[in-house]
Every structure is written in C-alpha cells, then in structure tokens.
Image: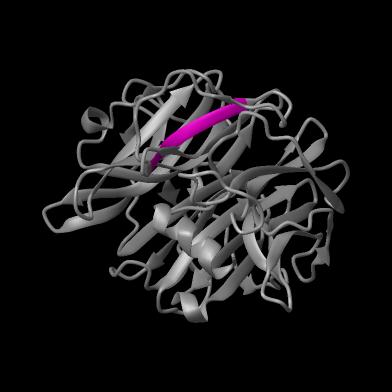
C-alpha cells in the first residue's frame, strides 16, 4: 500500500498544492549487522501532475492524482511507469474536476478512490471536501472510467484489500465537523459504512494483515496534542480498539505496515528528554511491544512493506516537517541496512508516500510552503 501519511493537515496540503507483542516470540526484529543490505537512493522522475497516491502493481508503478489545465481547472489523472525514469499518462474518461486519492489492485482490476470538487457538481451541505468518487481500470492502468460509489458518503484517505473485500478509511461529515469513518465493499461500487467502531477524530491509513485489517488514526487531545488510535477488524465492518494507553503508555504510532507475520508500527516514545523515534510490533494489532532499535535523532513518518521487504522512512531534524530524508530497509525482517540518506536536506519537507515493489522502493515527498511546493521523488533498487 501507499500511503499518504500525517495528520489531516497533510491531506489538506496535498489537495491544496497538487489540487507485534508482549506474549509472543517475534521472528521480526530490528538489528544492525555488517551483513545487512546496503541501499543507495537516487532521484527519480515524477509524474507530470499532482500525485494523490502511489502504488506498485506487479512490475510497474501506478500513480493517481490530478492534471492541471491551462484554464486552471484540475481533473482526475493517472500515470504508469515500469522503470521510475519516465511516466506514461493514462486515459481518464472523466471531465469533472476532481482528484484521485489512492488505488489498489482488486479482483483483476485497478480501483481508485477520490472525489469530485464541489464547484464541478452540486455538493449538498454540509459537505465541504467534494463528492466521493470511484474509478476503475480493467487493464494495466491505461484507461480509467468512473463507476458507481453507492453508500460511500464521505472522504477518502486510504484503501486496502484482502482480495475479497475493500476497506476504505476516511472521514464523514458530522454536524459542522468531520469524524473518522470506515466503509467496506465486495465489488468497489456498493459500499457500506462500518456498523461498529470506536469514535475517532481522524484516520491516517489502513492495511491488511494476517488477522484482518488494521487502521491507525487519532483523537484530538486538546491543543496540538493527539491521542494515537489503532483499530482492528476481521471483516471491515466491526472494529475494536487496541489499548495503546496500557500497551504503549508513552508511545505514539503514526504509520503501520504488515509483513508476512506481524504488524509493524512506527512513531515515537516520550521520555525525560522528549519524544524519540521508535518502532513497535504486534501479531494481532492489540498487543504491542517496542522493538530494540535506536533511530538516533530521526523523526519517523512512514513504514511500507512489499514483495522485496520493508522500509522505514523519516527525516533528521527536530522541527516539524524540516530535515534530511532518511530510510532503513530489511529484506527478511532481521538484518536492517544502516541509515541511508534519501536526498538532500530540505526545508519544510513532508514525506508523503512510500511503496515497495518487486525490485525497488519508491519514496515521494513535498517541499513546502504551499505556494511554492515541489514534488520530490527517490528510488532504490533492492535485492535479497
């Protein structure tokens, strides 16, 4: 999966700019070794438009987002690449203004979710972020068409699938505000809102693992503070909450990914000198333990898993959104590369997407401020 990580401010920035456990023995452990893989990152080309989501699909990359036209309007757009060195624009048969947010391979097709903007269609109040939209590609991502989205009445953030059903994490209108919400579907066109889930203020991402689905989100704790939340479901409809207050009393999980055996969460723990980067693991999403690894002064932002292994992405720098992008990689969950610098230091850097495919890892980010934002992209060839 990809992702699009951070609090809701990051999702808003993207749209504005680019229009496992205490009682089980783990086989997944983080440790440095002289035999660990060495990973070199290089700058890669970027799609000629605003990227809303990035995923690997077999041997190719699929990016979805929007294209900006000479009259200032933006319409849904998608691109594919087999090398990361050049991109081919897809045909999106949709002239309404809008944005594709993320995409997955589902039952032989590619499926993308996003929204149509309110100035392109009538948006009933109190909707403020556009009308929900779904697109389907019945090939390798070359042609996309809008399809029905019955029952999906909110805003998309992230999408995951186990091959039989889709689970969508996002937000829904609640009076004059929004609240975290989850929908599920067996065909991508008819959606049902989760029938039982704890109240959350925002959802960041969703991933599939051996026990079902896991969602990471947060509750507003007042002021600038947030309470991390992890929700678990076997079917996408009924969700229970991990007791992070007891499992990780000083921990904060901001991103999760599933390996073959465990869930890996990254974030921070708060000690006497303030928050420090940390990684956690769980076999069921409910019981968590901290992994013994020192990330130094890095701030962790994303973890992603794919066919070749797992990467953790962050940046060096204590100020929010400022620093040098860095990453760690493991092919087997045991031997990790030493910290590798992804790119040069950037002011106001936001790491937005990370994905791992058959042969490479991809990381994309934004260099802010909004009025002068640049898309940044890096690639690393991987080997076992």
Coloration of the structure image: one colour
Q: How many marks?
A: 0
In this view of the protein, which residue sits in the foreground, 331 or 222?
Answer: 222
Q: In the drawing, does residue 184 fall left or right of residue 149?
A: left
Specify whether residue 183 is painted magenta: yes
Q: What x and y, as percent, mark residue 87?
A: 79, 67
| Majority SS type along the magenta span | strand
Q: In the drawing, does residue 22 fall left or right of residue 351?
A: left
Which quadrant of the view contains residue 6?
bottom left
* Residue range corresponding to the magenta coloring: 178-184
Q: What x and y, as percent, mark residue 72?
A: 67, 75
In this view of the protein, which residue sits in the foreground, 189 or 168?
Answer: 189
In this view of the protein, which residue sits in the foreground, 215 or 185?
Answer: 185
Q: Is residue 199 above or below residue 344?
A: above
In this view of the protein, which residue sits in the foreground, 317 or 72?
Answer: 72
Q: In the drawing, does residue 348 fall left or right of residue 50?
A: left
């Amino acid at each position: 999966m990809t992702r699009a990580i951070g609090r809701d401010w990051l999702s808003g920035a993207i749209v504005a700019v680019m229009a496992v456990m205490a009682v089980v023995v783990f086989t997944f452990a983080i440790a440095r070794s002289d035999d660990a893989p060495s990973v070199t990152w290089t700058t890669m080309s970027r799609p000629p438009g605003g990227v809303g989501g990035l995923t690997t699909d077999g041997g190719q990359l699929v990016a979805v987002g929007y294209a900006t036209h000479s009259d200032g309007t933006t319409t849904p757009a998608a691109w594919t690449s087999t090398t990361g060195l050049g991109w081919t624009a897809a045909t999106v048969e949709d002239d309404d203004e809008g944005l594709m947010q993320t995409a997955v391979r589902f039952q032989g097709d590619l499926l993308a979710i996003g929204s149509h903007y309110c100035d392109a269609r009538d948006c009933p109040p109190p909707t403020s972020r556009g009308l929900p939209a779904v697109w389907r590609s019945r090939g390798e991502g070359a042609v996309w068409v809008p399809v029905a989205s019955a029952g999906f009445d909110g805003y998309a953030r992230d999408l995951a699938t186990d091959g039989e059903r889709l689970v969508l994490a996002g937000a829904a209108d609640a009076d004059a505000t929004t609240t975290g919400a989850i929908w599920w579907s067996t065909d991508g066109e008819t959606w049902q809102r989760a029938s039982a889930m704890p109240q959350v203020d925002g959802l960041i991402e969703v991933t599939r693992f051996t026990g079902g689905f896991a969602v990471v989100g947060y509750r507003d704790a007042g002021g600038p503070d947030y309470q991390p939340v992890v929700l678990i479901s076997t079917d996408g409809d009924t969700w229970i909450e991990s007791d992070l207050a007891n499992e990780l009393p000083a921990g904060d999980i901001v991103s999760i990914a599933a390996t073959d055996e465990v869930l890996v969460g990254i974030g921070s723990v708060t000690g006497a000198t303030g928050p420090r980067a940390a990684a956690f693991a769980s076999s069921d999403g409910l019981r968590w333990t901290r992994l013994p690894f020192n990330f130094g002064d890095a701030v962790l932002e994303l973890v992603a898993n794919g066919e070749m292994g797992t990467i953790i992405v962050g940046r060096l720098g204590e100020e929010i959104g400022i620093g040098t992008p860095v990453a760690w990689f493991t092919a087997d969950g045991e031997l990790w590369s030493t910290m590798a610098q992804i790119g040069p230091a950037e002011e106001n850097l936001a790491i937005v997407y990370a994905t791992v495919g058959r042969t490479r890892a991809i990381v994309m980010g934004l260099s802010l401020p909004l009025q002068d934002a640049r898309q940044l992209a890096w690639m690393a060839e991987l080997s076992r």
